[in-house]
Image (tube, rainbow, N blue to C red):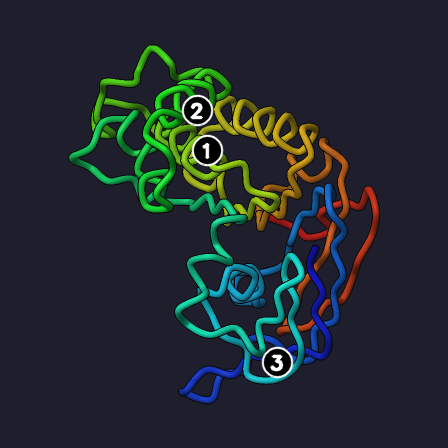
């Protein structure tokens, strides 16, 4: 699923975000990425869907060698990857239905399949009754659920979530986590960067800790390990 070998990332201003990362994630895993702010978590997850390009090393995602991947092929890599952001990144003028359907339309899915699939995932995230509303008419938790629906509508093998509960209240955060667990139980690999000590320590999964651009801890059923 994901292989990183001696991966470095240095930005044009000279800041080294990742320093010799070695990582292997198998299909179907649920992995938390934790660490202090500025540790390199977002850079690490960004490399996985080619939002960022590494400076040195070897990265393979879903069997694709990113070292030789041409820019025109990046959209094809991303067809098998769903991404959920802390700030949702919904299209404000589109309805809930249209936001989710858009993810299928850009990959030219058969229009006959779009409606059924969109309504299936809206049902999964419990928003079927909000399909005609626009994002501004929804709560933060509902907007995040739309973001999740959009991320999974094309049945990705990998889902990457960057601080998906960061802007949500505790009760809503647990609702979001139950959706992630269900998605993972259905076979999708889930990688989640988070600062939520309570979530990590309650829903036990593999924990990878990053500090100063290096992986300093990798534990199955680990704990958060940092003071908030």
Front label number (3 vs 2): 2
Q: Secondary structure at mark 3?
A: strand
- Residue at position x 32%, y 46% in the image: 106
Q: Quadrant of the N terminus?
A: bottom right
First in sequence: mark 3 vs mark 2? 3
- Residue at position x 59%, y 60% in the image: 36
Q: Nearer the viewer, residue 72 or 208?
A: 72
Q: Secondary structure at mark 1?
A: loop
Percent across and percent down for residue 109 are 38, 38
Horizontal side of 33 relative to 88 (left or right) equals right
- Residue at position x 64%, y 53% in the image: 33
The CA span between labels 1 and 2 is 7 Å
User: Within 10 Å of the Cα at label 2, are there few (<14), some (14-19), or many (20+) other Cα atoms?
Assistant: some
First in sequence: mark 1 vs mark 2? 2
Percent across and percent down for residue 212 are 63, 73
Percent across and percent down for residue 184 are 66, 33
Q: Secondary structure at mark 2?
A: helix
Question: For mark 2, what is the residue?
Answer: 117
Q: Nearer the viewer, residue 140 or 145?
A: 145
Question: For mark 1, what is the residue?
Answer: 153
> In which quadrant of the rendered view does residue 95 lie?
top left
Question: For mark 3, what is the residue?
Answer: 8
Q: How many numbered discs?
A: 3
First in sequence: mark 1 vs mark 3? 3
């Amino acid at each position: 699923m994901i292989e990183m070998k001696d991966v470095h990332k240095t930005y044009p201003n000279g800041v080294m975000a990742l320093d010799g990362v070695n990582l292997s994630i198998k299909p179907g895993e649920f992995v938390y990425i934790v660490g202090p702010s500025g540790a390199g978590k977002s850079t690490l997850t960004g490399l996985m869907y080619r939002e960022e390009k590494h400076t040195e090393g070897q990265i393979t995602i879903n069997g694709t060698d990113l070292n030789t991947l041409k820019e025109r092929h990046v959209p094809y890599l991303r067809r098998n990857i769903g991404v959920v952001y802390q700030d949702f990144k919904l299209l404000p003028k589109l309805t809930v239905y249209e936001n989710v359907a858009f993810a299928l339309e850009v990959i030219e899915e058969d229009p006959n399949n779009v409606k059924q699939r969109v309504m299936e995932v809206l049902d999964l995230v419990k928003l079927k009754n909000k399909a005609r509303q626009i994002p501004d008419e929804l709560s933060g938790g509902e907007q995040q659920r739309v973001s999740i629906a959009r991320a999974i509508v094309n049945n990705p093998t990998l889902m990457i979530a960057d601080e998906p509960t960061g802007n949500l209240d505790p009760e809503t955060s647990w609702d979001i986590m139950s959706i992630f667990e269900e998605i993972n139980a259905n076979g999708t690999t889930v990688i989640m960067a988070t600062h939520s000590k309570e979530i990590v320590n309650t829903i036990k999964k593999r924990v990878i800790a990053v500090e100063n651009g290096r992986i300093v801890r990798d534990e199955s059923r680990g704990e958060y390990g940092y003071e908030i």
